[in-house]
C-alpha cells in the first residue's frame, strides 16, 4: 500500500506499523458520551495509521489535525507494563503520567488551599536520597540492631519524613512545613502506594503470619507432595471449639445442675485426595497430647465405630453417610502412606514420629512453620465446622474480640443447657454428612470418590493394610512397650511383681517365675486402659496379662488419670486407703463443692474441674455427681480414713521428716 505522508510524518509511519498490535479496551460498559468520544478517536487513529490524510480525518470525525497527531503520540508512549499505551490512551480522562511540578512550592501561609499541586513529587526529585530513606523505613531494611515497630503507620512515616527533611536542610518556609497538616495526608497516600507497588515485600514485613502464609498460594506452583489416590496422603490437626458448652452433674439434692466446661478439642484425620474424614476424636482437656493422636490412629483402624449417644431428638444420619471404614469394605483397616502434621509438640512426640511410624509404616511431613495452607484440606474442614456449627451456637465466642461473640456466652452455655454430649452428637452427624456430601472440587462426594478410585481399572487400586494383623484385634495396635524390672524375692516374702506408675502388677505366671526377680521383662501398655498389662520375657515368652493390685483394677482408667491421681497423692490433696477405689476418690475430688469458691461464683465447680470430670466420666463410665465438702477438712476433697489402714496402703502420706530427724538427734 502506497502511504502518503501528511502532517504526521514519522509518527504516522510508526502508527502504521504498530496499530494492529495495540491493546484495545472494552468500552461496552461506558456511558454513551464517553463511548462516543472514544469511538471517534479510534476511527481517527485507524484512518491515520492507514495513511489517511488529516483533512479527511477531520471531516469524518471532527478531530483537528494537531489533536490527531497528539493522540498518536499518546498511543505510542510506553505504559508501566512495558508495552505501548495503544488505544487505551484514547479513553476519556485517562492520565498517562503523573503531574510534574517545575517551580518550587509557593510560600503560602498556613491554612491556605492553593499553590501546593505537585509539591511532594518536586520534593522527592530535589532531595534524591529521600525516597530511599523512606523506603528503608517502610520495609525495615535500615540495618542490623535497629528496632522497628510491628507495622509502620502513616503517622510514624510522616514524623520520619519531616525529621529527614530538616536533616537534609529543607527550608521551613516551604511545603510541607507551611501546609495546614504538614503533608500528613500526602504521606498516608504515599505509604499505601509504595506498599501496593511492592506487594510481596510489604506483606512479608508488615502483615500477620496468616497473610504471609497466603503469599505463596495461587502462584501456579504445584506442591511437591501431591496425591490423587485415597489414603496416599492424610492430614492431622487439632482444633478447640470457639463456643462455651456445659455438662450436667447430679447434685446431692437429686437435681441436675449444668456446669460450664473449659474446652473441647477436636482432632481429625482427613484424606487429602478425597477430603473424607477418616476418623476423629473429641478430647475434654486443656491441651492435647501424643496419646490423643495415637487414639485417633486406633479409631481409624477399627472395623466398627461406636457412634455417640443419640441425645438430640430428630437428628438422623442420612442414608449412605458415615466414615470410609464404615461404609466401604475395602477401607476397613486401611493404612495411609504419608501424614502431614503441623508443628505441635503432640505431633512431634516419639510416639508419633518413631513408635507409631514403625508399626504402621507411614512417612511424616511437618512442613514449614506457620504455613497452615500446606494443610489446606483439614484447615478448610475446621473453618467449615467453625462457621457452620460452633459460630452458630447461642454461646459462641465469635472469631475474635468484638467479632461475633454472643452476649453473656458463659451464662448461656449453662442456662440454655448447651450440653457437650449434644455437641458431640451434632458434630458426628455433620462429619458423616460431610463425607457423603458432593463437593465443587470433586463434583461428587468424598465417599463416592474413594469408591470410584478403588473400582476403577478393574479394581486396580489396593489399599495398604497391616501385614499379618487381624483387624478385629485392632485394640492391640499401637501399644506402648517398656522394659521394667521384676521385684520381690524370698528374703522379703513378696511374690514376683512389677511396678508401673506407682502401682504393683502381677499374674499367676509371673508369681511362679521367681527366677526373673531382678531381671528385666517387657510390658505392653495400652494407655487408654492400664488396669492390665501384657508381659513378655526378653526372649518373647508370654507371662500372661498382669493385673493391677488392689482397687486399681476395678474401674477402667487411662495413664493420664493415674498420673493425675498420683500427683494429688504426692501433694497430699487426696489420701487413698485400703478399701477405697482410687479412681472413684479422684472423681469425688473433682466433683466436691468448694464453699470458698462458691462465694465468688454461682457454679459449684470450676470449668477446669468440670472438664476433667467429664473426661474421666467418658473414660470410666462413672456418673457425674456433685459431692459436699467434708466439714472441718483441710482440703475440700480429703477423705477421712481409718488410721490403722494407712500402714497397709502404698499411698499413705509422707511422714514429717523434720520430726523424725529431731527424734534421731534426741537419741
Image (tube, helix red, strand yellow):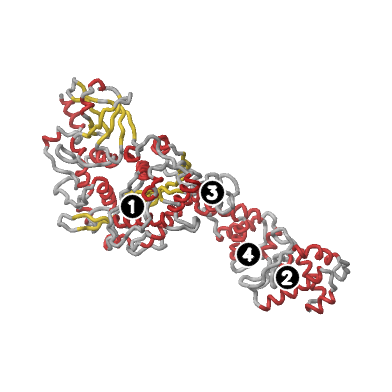
Q: In the depicted view, which residue is nearer to us: 641 or 44?
A: 44
Depth-wise, is mark 2 or mark 3 nearer the camera?
2
Residue at 15%, 57% (x, y): give it.
253
**Relative to residue 269, is residue 173 drawn left or right?**
right
Residue at 25%, 35% (x, y): give it.
532
x%, y% of residue 382? 42, 54
Residue at 44%, 53% (x, y): give it.
448
Q: Quadrant of residue 504?
A: top left
Q: For mark 3, what is the residue?
A: 147
Q: How many marks?
A: 4
Return the mark for residue 90. 2
Q: Between marks 3 and 1, how big is the CA–CA gap?
A: 38 Å
The reply to whether residue 204 is visible in this rendering is: no
Return the mark for residue 177. 4
Q: In the depicted view, which residue is nearer to us: 453 or 413?
A: 453
Depth-wise, is mark 4 or mark 3 nearer the camera?
3
**Which of disc 4 and disc 2 is earlier in sequence?**
2
Q: In the depicted view, which residue is nearer to us: 42 or 172?
A: 42
Q: For mark 1, what is the residue?
A: 263
Q: Between marks 4 and 3, how big is the CA–CA gap?
A: 28 Å
Mark 3 secondary-structure assignment = loop
Tell me whether the residue at label 4 lies in contact with that at label 3, contact meaning CB atoms closer than 8 angstroms: no
**Which of disc 1 and disc 3 is earlier in sequence?**
3
Q: Between marks 1 and 2, how big is the CA–CA gap?
A: 63 Å
**Which of disc 1 and disc 4 is earlier in sequence?**
4
Q: Between marks 2 and 3, how big is the CA–CA gap?
A: 49 Å
Amino acid at each position: 500500500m502506497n502511504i502518503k505522508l501528511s502532517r504526521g510524518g514519522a509518527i504516522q509511519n510508526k502508527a502504521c506499523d504498530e496499530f494492529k498490535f495495540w491493546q484495545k479496551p472494552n468500552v461496552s460498559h461506558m456511558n454513551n458520551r464517553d463511548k462516543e468520544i472514544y469511538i471517534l478517536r479510534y476511527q481517527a487513529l485507524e484512518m491515520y495509521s492507514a495513511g489517511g490524510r488529516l483533512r479527511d480525518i477531520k471531516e469524518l470525525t471532527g478531530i483537528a489535525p494537531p489533536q490527531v497527531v497528539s493522540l498518536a503520540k499518546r498511543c505510542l508512549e510506553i505504559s508501566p507494563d512495558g508495552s505501548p499505551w495503544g488505544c487505551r490512551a484514547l479513553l476519556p480522562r485517562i492520565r498517562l503520567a503523573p503531574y510534574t511540578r517545575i517551580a518550587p512550592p509557593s510560600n503560602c501561609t498556613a491554612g491556605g488551599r492553593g499553590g501546593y499541586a505537585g509539591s511532594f513529587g518536586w520534593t522527592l526529585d530535589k532531595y534524591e536520597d529521600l525516597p530511599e530513606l523512606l523506603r528503608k523505613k517502610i520495609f525495615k531494611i535500615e540495618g542490623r540492631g535497629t528496632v522497628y515497630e510491628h507495622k509502620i503507620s502513616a503517622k510514624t512515616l510522616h514524623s520520619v519524613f519531616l525529621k529527614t527533611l530538616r536533616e537534609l536542610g529543607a527550608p521551613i518556609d516551604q511545603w510541607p512545613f507551611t501546609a495546614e497538616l504538614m503533608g500528613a495526608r500526602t504521606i498516608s497516600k504515599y505509604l499505601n502506594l509504595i506498599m501496593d507497588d511492592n506487594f510481596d515485600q510489604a506483606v512479608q514485613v508488615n502483615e500477620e503470619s496468616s497473610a504471609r502464609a497466603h503469599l505463596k498460594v495461587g502462584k501456579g506452583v504445584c506442591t511437591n507432595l501431591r496425591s490423587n489416590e485415597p489414603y496416599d496422603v492424610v492430614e492431622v490437626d487439632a482444633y478447640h471449639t470457639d463456643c462455651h458448652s456445659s455438662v450436667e452433674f447430679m447434685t446431692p439434692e437429686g437435681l441436675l445442675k449444668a456446669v460450664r466446661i473449659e474446652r473441647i478439642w477436636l482432632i481429625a484425620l482427613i484424606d487429602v485426595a478425597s477430603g473424607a474424614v477418616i476418623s476423629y476424636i473429641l478430647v475434654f482437656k486443656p491441651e492435647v497430647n501424643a496419646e490423643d493422636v495415637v487414639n485417633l490412629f486406633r479409631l481409624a483402624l477399627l472395623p466398627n465405630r461406636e457412634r455417640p449417644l443419640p441425645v438430640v431428638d430428630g437428628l438422623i444420619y442420612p442414608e449412605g453417610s458415615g466414615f470410609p471404614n464404615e461404609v466401604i469394605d475395602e477401607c476397613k483397616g486401611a493404612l495411609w502412606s504419608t501424614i502431614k502434621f503441623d508443628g505441635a509438640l503432640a505431633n512431634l512426640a516419639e510416639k508419633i514420629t518413631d513408635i507409631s511410624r514403625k508399626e504402621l509404616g507411614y512417612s511424616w511431613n511437618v512442613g514449614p512453620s506457620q504455613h497452615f495452607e500446606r494443610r489446606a484440606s483439614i484447615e478448610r474442614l475446621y473453618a467449615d465446622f467453625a462457621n457452620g456449627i460452633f459460630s452458630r451456637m447461642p454461646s459462641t465466642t465469635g472469631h475474635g474480640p468484638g467479632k461475633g461473640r454472643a452476649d453473656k456466652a458463659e451464662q448461656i452455655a449453662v442456662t440454655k443447657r448447651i450440653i457437650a454430649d449434644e455437641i458431640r452428637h451434632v458434630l458426628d452427624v455433620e462429619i458423616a454428612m460431610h463425607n457423603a456430601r458432593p463437593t465443587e472440587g470433586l463434583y461428587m462426594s468424598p465417599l463416592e470418590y474413594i469408591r470410584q478410585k478403588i473400582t476403577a481399572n478393574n479394581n486396580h487400586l489396593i489399599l495398604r493394610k497391616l501385614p499379618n494383623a487381624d483387624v478385629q484385634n485392632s485394640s492391640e495396635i499401637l501399644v506402648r512397650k517398656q522394659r521394667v524390672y521384676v521385684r520381690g524375692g524370698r528374703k522379703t516374702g513378696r511374690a514376683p511383681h512389677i511396678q508401673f506408675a506407682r502401682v504393683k502388677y502381677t499374674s499367676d505366671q509371673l508369681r511362679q517365675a521367681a527366677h526373673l526377680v531382678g531381671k528385666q521383662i517387657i510390658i505392653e501398655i495400652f494407655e487408654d486402659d492400664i488396669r492390665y498389662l501384657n508381659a513378655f520375657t526378653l526372649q518373647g515368652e508370654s507371662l500372661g496379662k498382669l493385673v493391677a493390685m488392689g482397687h486399681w483394677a476395678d474401674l477402667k482408667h487411662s495413664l493420664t488419670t493415674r498420673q493425675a491421681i498420683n500427683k494429688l497423692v504426692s501433694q497430699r490433696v487426696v489420701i487413698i486407703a485400703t478399701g477405697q477405689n482410687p479412681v472413684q476418690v479422684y472423681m469425688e475430688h473433682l466433683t466436691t463443692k468448694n464453699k470458698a469458691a462458691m462465694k465468688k461464683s454461682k457454679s459449684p465447680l470450676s470449668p477446669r474441674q468440670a472438664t476433667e470430670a467429664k473426661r474421666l466420666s467418658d473414660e470410666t463410665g462413672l456418673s457425674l455427681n456433685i459431692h459436699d465438702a467434708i466439714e472441718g477438712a483441710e482440703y475440700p476433697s480429703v477423705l477421712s480414713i481409718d488410721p490403722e489402714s494407712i500402714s497397709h496402703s502404698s499411698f499413705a502420706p509422707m511422714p514429717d521428716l523434720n520430726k523424725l530427724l529431731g527424734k534421731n538427734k534426741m537419741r
